[in-house]
Amino acid sequence: MRRKKVRQTWNKYNLYNISRMQTPTAYDKTFFQQKWKSKALTRAYHGEQIKEKHWERMFRRSIPAVVPMDHEYLAKHDGSELAAGRGSGLDEAEKGRNPAKTPYMQMTFHPTERRLDTAIFRALFASSARQARQFVTHGFVKVNGKRMIYPGYMLNPGDMFQVDPERVMWATGARKDQDKYETSGEYMTTPEENEPVDEVAEEDEDARPASAESPSTASAADAPEATERTPEELRKELTALMDQAKILLKDPKDLSPKQKIELRSFRTNLKRAISRNKATESEAEDYESQLAALTARLAVSPSSSNSSTSSANTSAVPTEVEDLTKEQAKLLKEALQRAHENPYDPSKPYLTPWAPRPYMSAFAFIPRYLEVSHSICSAVYLRHPVARPGLAEVPTPFHKETNQLAHAWYLRRR
C-alpha cells in the first residue's frame, strides 16, 4: 500500500487509493525524477495493459482541441473592429469575464481512448479495462455488426460496438453471497445432483393423493408448535399454490395476453421450486405474495373451487385481496411489473433481481465522445476526444501538472 497506484477498475481498494491520492512533491526531486514519477503514475492508470513500446508508438505530441466561436459576433462583425482606434481595437466599457484556460496536458493519453477495450470500459459495459479486454478476446464484442477479437482495435468516428448483454449484467451486477446460496441450495448444481432430486419429486407427487385422503391420527392440540415449517409442509403449500394458478388459467377468455404470460411464467417457476424439493420458507412466502398480486390484478378469487386443498395461509389471500384499497392495488401492480422486468432467476451467475455493484456510483459517468444505449448494450464512438476551455474530455484522476510532466517525458526523443 506504500506505492499505491490507481487503475481503470471499479474495485473498492482502487477507489480508496483514488481518495487518498496526492500530487507528488517536487521540491526534493530533480526534473528527471519528477518526470519519471509522473510517467509511472499516469501509465498505471491509462492503458496499463498496453506495452510501453506500443504506447510510445501511439503517443502524439499534438493535442486535439477546439475553440468555441460566438456565431452572433461573427455575423455582426467582419474583423475590421479589431484595427479601430490606435490599432488594437476600441476600448470596451464592460469587459467580459476571462475565459477559462484550456487544459491541454490533460489530453496526454487521448490515443488510448480510441482502443476498443478502453471504450467498452468508458461505456460502463465492464468493471475494469482488463475485463473489457477479456470480453473482446473471448468473442463477446461486435464492431459494426462483425465479431472483433482484437482489444487494441482503434475505433473510428461513427463505429458502433456491442457487448453480449449477459456479460454486461454479470460484469456490472452485484455478486451472489456464496455462503447463503450454498446453505439454501439455490446455487447452480451439477446434473448428477439434480437427477435424484427429480426422482424423489416424482415419487412424492405419486404418493401425495393417497396421503391426502388418509385421516391424521394425532390431534393438532397435542402437536407442539413448530418455529419453522418442514419441507413437506412447504411442498404441500407450493402444490396448493400450483392448483390455484391452474384454476386461474382454466378460463382464458377473461385474461389478457399479458396476464396469461405472467401466470404461465409464475406456474413454471413454481414447478421448478416443487421439483427441486429444497424450497425455503422465504421462497414460499414470495410465491404467496406473487399469487396475491396476480389475483388482485385479475380480480378473481382463487378459492372458488378446490378450497379443501388450500392451506390456512393461502385461504386468507382472497379476503386480503378484497380489502385492498386503490393505493395498495396500485403498489401491488407496480411491484409485479418490477418483478416481471427484473425477475428472480437462481440460475444466473449474478444476483437476481439485478442490482448494480457496490461503489459503482463513483465511476458511473460517460464521456462526451460516446453515445451509449444500456438497454441494448451498444454504443457509438462519435468522434475523437478534444480539449475545450475549462474541460478535457479524457477522464483522468491526476492533476494537470502530473500529466504535464508525463507529456514532457515522452517528448524527450522527439
Image (tube, grey):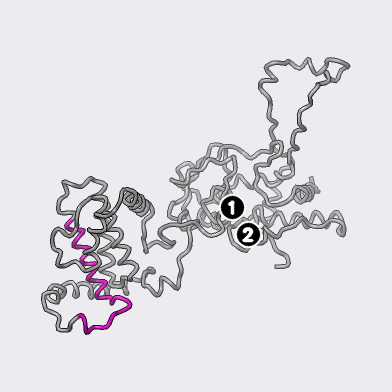
Residue at x 83%, y 15% (from the top left corner): 84
Region of the chain picked out in magenta, as a range: 220-247
Compared across the picture, whether 16 is left or right of 264 comes to right
Against 88, residue 220 (above or below) is below
C-alpha gap between disc 2 and disc 1: 9 Å
Which badge, 2 or 1, is on the more N-terminal residue?
2
Residue at x 57%, y 45% (from the top left corner): 366
Disc 1 target residue:
363
In the rendering, at what x and y percent does residue 344 appear? Answer: 36, 59
Q: Between residues 143 and 236, which one lies in front from this camera angle?
A: 236
Disc 2 target residue:
15
The residue type indicated by label 2 comes to: Leu
Q: Crowding at label 2, few (<14), some or many (≥20) Cα neighbours within 10 Å?
A: some
- In the rendered image, which quarter is residue 104 located in? top right
Q: Do the residues bearing badges 2 and 1 touch, measured as CB atoms within 8 Å?
A: yes
Total marks in image: 2
The residue type indicated by label 1 comes to: Phe
